[in-house]
Amino acid sequence: MKTLKVTLRKSVIGTPEKHRRIIRSLGLTKINQSVVHKDTPTIRGQIHKTSHLIEVSEEAEG
């Protein structure tokens, strides 16, 4: 299964509360912080909603 590396690139200040909760649920708290998640439909939906704040790169697991 592929993994996705998600990096917070912009601040959540001034964004809707729903976007802040999504960023927090992804495990991101600071700018330039990265986390790795499995490529699932749930994670893809969260990435889609907050794509203007984050950067995503695909990585092959292994």
Image (tube, rainbow, N blue to C red):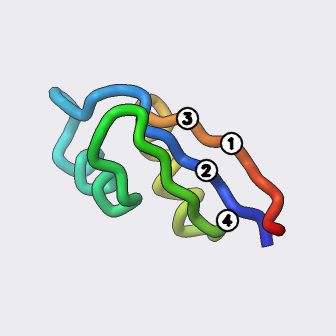
Task: Give residue 2's mark.
Answer: none
Compute the Cα span from label 3 to label 1.
7 Å
Q: Amino acid at mark 3?
A: Glu
| Front residue (pair 41, 30) | 30
Whole-percent x, y for residue 36 in the image: 57, 59
Q: Is residue 9 left or right of residue 55?
A: left
| Tag 4 secondary structure | loop
Binning the other alpha carbons within 10 Å of mark 4 as few (below 14), some (14 to 19) or many (20 upward) gives some
| Tag 1 secondary structure | strand
| Tag 3 secondary structure | strand
| x 57%, y 64%: residue | 37
Q: Residue furthest front?
A: 62
| x 34%, y 33%: residue | 31
Mark 3–mark 1 contact, CB under 8 Å? yes
Q: Which residue is denoted by mark 2 in the rendering? A: 5
Comes first in the chain, label 4 or label 1: 4
Q: Which residue is denoted by mark 4 in the rendering? A: 39
Comes first in the chain, label 2 or label 4: 2
Q: Amino acid at mark 4?
A: Asp
Whole-percent x, y for residue 60 in the image: 82, 59
Binning the other alpha carbons within 10 Å of mark 2 as few (below 14), some (14 to 19) or many (20 upward) gives some
Comes first in the chain, label 2 or label 1: 2
Q: Is residue 28 above or below residue 51?
A: below
Q: Which residue is denoted by mark 3 in the rendering? A: 55
Compute the Cα span from label 3 to label 2.
8 Å
The quadrant in which the C terminus is found is bottom right
Q: Which residue is denoted by mark 1 in the rendering? A: 57
Q: Is residue 39 left or right of residue 51?
A: right
